[in-house]
Image (cartoon, coloured by chain):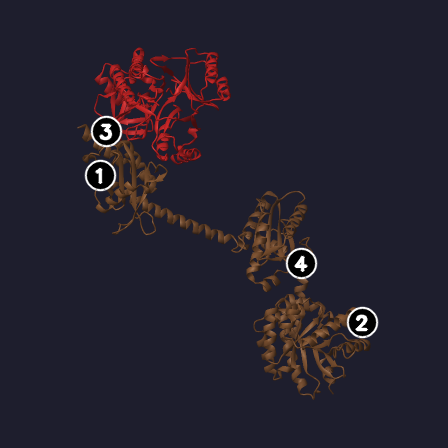
Chain colours: A brown, B red
Amino acid sequence: MNKALFLISLQHELAMAIGNKLDLKAMLKVFLKVCFNRLDLTSAHIYVYCDQSGMPSKSLPLKGTSYKHFLSIPKNKRGQSWSKSTILTNFARQLNSRQKNISFRCDNGQYLSGFIIPEYGLLTFETHYELAEEVQKALQPILQKLATSCYTSIVHASLVKEVHSRQLIEEKVAFQAQHDGLTGLFNRQHINLLLGNALEDARTYEKTGSVVFVDLNRFKPINDAMGHTVGDKILLTLAHRLQALSNENIDIGRFGGDQFIILLKNLKGDYQTTIDQLIAQINQLLVAPFIIDTNSYKLTCSIGYAFFPLQSSTVTNLIKFADIAMYEAKRAKTQQGKQYQRAMSDKIKKRLAYIDDMKQGLEQGDFKLYYQAQYNHYGDIIGAEALLRWQHPIHGKESPALYIPIAEESDLILSIGQWVLEQACRDIKKLEQLSLPKSFNKIAINISAKQLIQHDFQVSVLEAITQNDIPANRLALELTENLLVENIEDSIKLIASLKENEIDCAIDDFGTGYSSLTYLKRIPASVLKIDRSFVTNIAQSSESAAIASMIISLGKTLNMDILAEGVETQEELNCLKELGCFHYQGFYFSGPLPFEQFSQLFK
Amino acid sequence: MATELFTWYTVSDTLNDFKSGLSLAQESGAESLLVLTCSLNNYPEEELNALFTACPLKLFGGIYPMLTLQGDLIKQGALIIGFKETFDVTLFTQLNHVTTENSLEDFITSTLQEKQNFRGQDNFLMFYDALISNIEGFIDCLFECLDHGIKIAGGGAGNLDFIQRQCVFTNSGIHSDAILLVALPRALHTSVAHGWKTFDEPFLVSEAQGQTVQSLNYQPAYEVYCQTIENATEYTFKDTDFFEIAKHFPLGIKDINNNIIVRDPILAKNNQLQCFGNIPINSMVYLLEGKIDTLVASTEKAAATLFSNLTKTTIPTTMIFDCISRALFMEDEFEKELNVIAEQCRSGTLFGVLSLGEIANSQSGAIRLLNKSIVISSW
């Protein structure tokens, strides 16, 4: 009676020990522990069937499915995993192949009893006594229940894994939504959100904060010349450095390109001092050069900032103000940073109004092309440079030095450039109808940086030539030395391609930039124009004469024509002649003339 | 060859006497000292701490309700045994802070790693604070994590009032909430006995939580326990202190080989029984009864088995961990139990403690917490 009771209670206790935990290993461990105490075991082991990835299998094992050692109590034997025990391994192999309960008496007098956990694995007990047959039979229904619990645990684990993967993806998506992909800093959207919150706090708790805009100086040339990979590494390095500034009151974000934004909250007391210190820290972070792939890059930045809620209490305005202030700092070439001032916006408004005036002027025909003739040493006209003139309806004649940079900052320079191209072609057409001297070659127009980087620039040049039905060799393009160097590879390709179409290029203002002679050698330009700064008073300045002489020699070596700009006196002319320069442009010969007057020169 | 070279005891409860005994022990040429004191002594803790921390020899032991030496019971006083070897001592502390199974495993694993997994050390004595709440969790986990079978004997230290106090000795002082494992330099042989017999049909433990049995056969555990005893005996619980009757009728969990693990019901509260050891839910428990003669006979048999197995070349040291409740049950006749051991132990020093729970290996090798039992250990 008591034996029967014992078996029933054993079954009951073991059955109740199954499924108390969801994790497979924990669940099986609880079961094994109860077996251990109740059956007076020396050791207990579980092997489980695994899928191809080595994970416990939740589906019916296929023939030849592998099983692996999963759990033992005690964990190891004499410093070795039980999976390395030959006796146990052989026993498990036998048990698996027979797929029915087996027993074995070891040489040391211990017994091994093996059981099948249907569809899930193998169970082995080591005892110091022989496990009675009725006990083994009593275990059968328990093993069936254990199998069901294994299934539940494995399914649960796969669900947990799935939920976890989903969580990770969601976290990643959430992170990506808030952070910049390259630098890991907050992105523009999230900075906007943080600024919105900071503004709300500042309003509620009467606090002050600041938006600081940081923009790298001359980053674009590095990016263009060395490639985006290098540029990205610089940005990443800078982001890491800037990140060092962050704390509970300072958030760092990347606004885009090489622009970073720093949000300061809860500024206390003398907040101007805090900002000054921050600016000093930012500049300090840039002191160390950026070492990328063994090259060293030294960079500076321009910084602008605005306070909130003092200067604005809207996110858009604050960022705009800090941006405006940063551009002011960049124009002023200062590293001390500039606080936004209303006057800066007024200046921008005026600038915008001026651009509007230019647009109108362009539409109303207020822009004119003047031509300054170019001569050879015999006094024959060899060509001319087309120069833009604008008659402002209120201000009168505007200086190109004023409106060209403004037009270049906006896209208006493209419209102006296109007009110049087309007008020059029209004028060339008119000239063609005159009897031009043999010495006359071409009309040159100035090209801006923005025009040059337009992908359809060459097409528009060729179209203008075709539309006006003029010989292509009557048109030349003047590009400044600095413009060429900023985008050297593309420039070389473009100039070569234009040359194939008989359109020559001249390098303007030569000598003022610092172009590498290696580059110059590769640029297929036809003319080098000596900048007027080396021509003025050349007779009195040995330095100017030396530079001009060098440019002349260089031009000859590279098989380029040399033309001196800004020739105003006989003395200068004589000097240039002596140095070997035989083409000239300047007031000594002729000033810029309206087309009608210019065309009179040929009569 | 004797394994110990110094034995000193006192039945005085004053610290000065103990101090002089400790001085003698330090001058005896011993390398390690096993220090056992009675809980009834009047030893100020701070001074005891200072003595132990100043002791240049390896020191271990604890405070127990009573001590034994040969066939005598020491109700107050102290006992110091000096050994020739330096014993390796490992202390586990703050066990009550280790509340989950995983943290206990981490705790034990990290200590085992520090001790190179006790490589080459297979024989241990264990002195521990009897009021550690999860001593069975600890010994289960120790067995599970150790990569080799160990032989162990031990007993719970502390007071009969069941208030947790500092009771485990090391060179760093007296500790509570601590377990001390002392590696022995020779093979340990143990023999376990209790002598309790079943006297009724088993009960299903239908509700239990650790050491508390809430219901037996789906009835309140206390009611079932009392009714069964009252129906079968002359005892009535109504006007008697619970423990006065319960000490005669422990519970027993029978394993597959009919070995009984005794569990001592020490408290009745809210119709539940509080035992001195875990009772697994869904297990079958028996009510046990015992007679002094059968208990003593069982001890005599265990002692005879043990001593007959020992080699004749070594004069062994024998330490017993005898449950205090056996002494409370046998009362004046308790020394009979000590005498039957002393009669079997014909050489070497025989001493021991009356403990609150005993530790020994089961036949399978697992480590078990016992109640109302005696563990005789020789090395």
Name the residue tied to disc 3.
B257
Q: Which mark is nearer the camera, 3 or 1?
A: 1
Give the quadrant of residue A533: bottom right
Left or right? Give the position of A139 relative to A285.
left
In the picture, which quadrant includes the N terminus of chain A?
Answer: top left
Left or right? Give the position of A398 relative to A498.
right
Left or right? Give the position of A421 relative to B161.
right
Q: CA distance from mark 1 to mark 4?
A: 87 Å
Q: CA distance from mark 4 to mark 3?
A: 91 Å
Residue type, numbered disc 4: Lys
In the image, which disc is placed on residue A330? Answer: 4
Q: CA distance from mark 2 to mark 4?
A: 34 Å
Which of the chains bears the disc numbered 1?
A
Left or right? Give the position of A285 relative to B300.
right
Secondary-structure class at tag 3? loop
Q: Which mark is nearer the camera, 3 or 2?
A: 3
Q: Which one is nearer the viewer's eye here, A205 or A222?
A: A222
**Residue B168 shows in this picture:** no
Give the quadrant of residue A230: bottom right
Residue type, numbered disc 3: Asn
Pointer 4: residues within 10 angstroms few (<14), some, or many (20+)? many
Give the quadrant of residue B230: top left
Residue type, numbered disc 1: Ser
Mark 1 near mark 4, Cβ–Cβ under 8 Å?
no
Which of the chains bears the disc numbered 2?
A
Q: CA distance from mark 3 to mark 1?
A: 18 Å
Q: Which mark sits nearer the N-terminus, 2 or 4?
A: 4
